[in-house]
Amino acid sequence: MKVAAVVRDLMLYSRIESAAASAHADLVRVDEPRSVPPDVELVFVDWSARETSWSEPLRALRDAGVRVVLFGPHVDLDAHAAARDAGLGPMMARSKLITQLPQLL
């Protein structure tokens, strides 16, 4: 499986990287959704670091059949609402993402 991570936090990325290696998934880190390679099947997105330009390319990826998993702090109600408003929600809590990585991969 080819996976991309739009994650700027390197500590968090290392946890995703470790889980991806355990799942024998190929992982690439990108700085923004427009840089996601075309053959990716799954994209993890740190929605708390989002920029306004991210919604459209993420919807295009999702519409092309790519699984898009948004995550961020569970207490960031603005981020949850922004994900829903962008048609990309729900957003997963960061702690839940970490515990669910093996199943997601």
Image: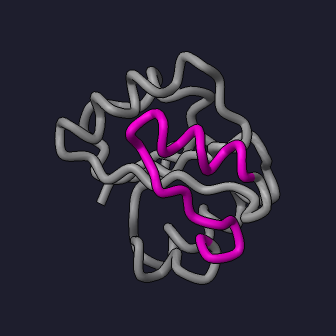
Which quadrant would residue 53 be assigned to in this image? top right
Could you tell me which residue is drawn at 65 percent across and 23 percent down?
A: 51
Instruction: Name the dominant secondary structure of the magenta segment.
Output: helix
* 16 horizontally vs 25: left or right: right
Could you tell me which residue is drawn at 73 percent across and 64 percent down?
A: 74
Residue 64: percent from the left, percent from the top?
Answer: 18, 36
Could you tell me which residue is drawn at 31 percent across and 53 percent down?
A: 67
Residue 16: percent from the left, percent from the top?
Answer: 61, 64
* 20 horizontally vs 80: left or right: left
Q: Which residues are magenta?
A: 77-97
* 40 horizontally vs 52: left or right: left
Residue found at the far left of this picture = 64
The number of callouts visible is 0
Q: Is residue 64 magenta?
A: no
**Quarter holding the C terminus?**
bottom left
Residue nearest the observer in this picture, 39 or 74: 74
Residue 4: percent from the left, percent from the top?
Answer: 46, 46
Could you tell me which residue is drawn at 58 percent across and 38 percent down?
A: 82
Q: Is residue 84 magenta?
A: yes
Residue 22: percent from the left, percent from the top?
Answer: 50, 79
* Residue 76, above or below 37: below
Residue nearest the observer in this picture, 72 or 87: 87
Which quadrant would residue 59 be assigned to in this image? top left
* Residue 90, above or below 15: above
